Image: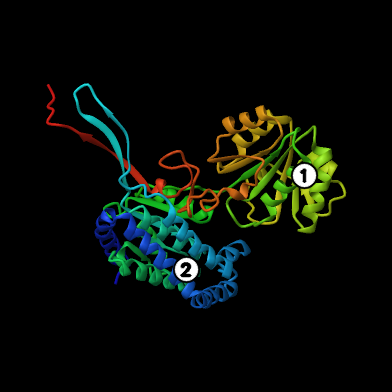
Amino acid sequence: MHIRDYMQQLGQQARQASRIMAKANTHTKNQALAHIASAIRRDRSLLRQANEQDTTQARAEGLAPALLDRLTLTEAGIAAMAEGLEQIASLPDPIGEITNLKFRPSGIQVGQMRVPLGVIGIIYEARPNVTVDAAGLCVKSGNATILRGGSEAIHCNRLLAKIVQEGLVSVGLPANAVQVVETTDRAAVGEMITLTEYIDVIVPRGGKELIARLTREAKVPMIKHLDGICHVYVDDTADTVKALDVAFNAKCQRYGTCNTMETLLVSRAIARQILPPLAAHYEKEKVELRCDVESLSILDSYPYKKQAEEADWYTEYLAPILAIRIVDGLDGAIEHINTCSSHHTDAIVTENYDNATRFLREVDSASVMVNASTRFADGFEYGLGAEIGISNDKLHARGPVGLEGLTSQKYIVLGKGEIRK
């Protein structure tokens, strides 16, 4: 079948399934999620085998370390997928919720009801866990979805799709509510992002090049973030222990994620106190530091360093590389972040309430944190059960996109025969 015909078929099937999913009750959806979680645990050895097939091929083809890390599915990762589905099932069902109901002078009541978006297309690279997270969120929010994972994860994604569809069918929901694009032909992406008749929104999760391409070419609306240039600012009132823990974890807990710190900002008043012990931690992990002139002087003996260039303040490394800049206190930090960040996630370490409040209010990012690692910017950690992606746009959703981000609202009117005069 021609790629265009194939994608049209997936779109038609998804649209039909979406009408059934929109009517599904909470109990049925939760049963499906529980069955999928159980089947994932049951088939964990098969999933590891499929993933090993994918990772072996990816290594042979020279996949970048950050992408290979995302592709690898561990026992803990499989357990987290199942747990995420169960957490989604435990969350309140947003569909049908009525809010803001109020009487008007005419006698009618006007309110809003939360409803599914319809069909959600998700395009992602090298992350088989996204297949499950996205499927679970779409099922609970009453949507249908078409999933186009990266070719490097095709074997694992195909198996996960079968598991998900097994769970749907077991409770009488349509298997086509969750479809994985079976072809690895990149032309499928080009067709998918123009299917305005069948797909209501596209959620891309991948590298900067992929999302830049989709931004140029997509006709279907998107929920997206382009990159994750995240900051931690160590304020002059910061607790040293908190600062060391947060700044180390935000960079080194995992390098290849969009919520990893890429630039460390330090108040000039505390720089000589905090940078040497923090650098000692980074040295153990062989983190390369891209330093401004002032921090370069303070870290003169650090073995893995170089002077930062202007481009370093705008770079998402996804690697053991960190840009460091000393700033003139809170004003300098906020100015730098609002100028150079990708408006994804930024954190302050401080013991000053007023500084914390100003940082929360004035930093223009999707997630803003006080005394916590940027690595917490994640749907699972936020209690959303999972996330379908992270948005640093301001419409339609912002930050980790969970159940509510996959819904819309329509106005409802309740009357007793009123007519307009």
Q: Position of residue 372 (x, y in %)?
A: 65, 44
Please state, as top left, top right, bottom left or bottom right, where the C terminus lies in the image.
top left
Residue 183 shows in this picture: no
Which residue corresponds to mark 2?
151
Q: Nearer the viewer, residue 175 or 172?
A: 172
Secondary element at image label 2: helix
The residue depicted at 80 percent of the width and 49 percent of the height is 279
The residue depicted at 60 percent of the width and 73 percent of the height is 59
Q: Position of residue 167 (x, y in %)?
A: 36, 68
Q: Earlier in the sequence, mark 1 or mark 2?
A: 2
Q: Position of residue 357 (x, y in %)?
A: 62, 30
Callout 2 amino acid: Ser
Secondary element at image label 1: helix
Which residue corresponds to mark 1?
241
Q: Nearer the viewer, residue 106 or 10?
A: 106
Callout 1 amino acid: Val
Q: For mark 1, does the 10 Å Cα neighbourhood hold few (<14), some (14 to 19), or many (20 or more) residues? A: few
Q: Measured along the vertical axis of the image, is residue 339 above or below residue 419?
A: below
Disc number placed over residue 409 in the picture, else none = none
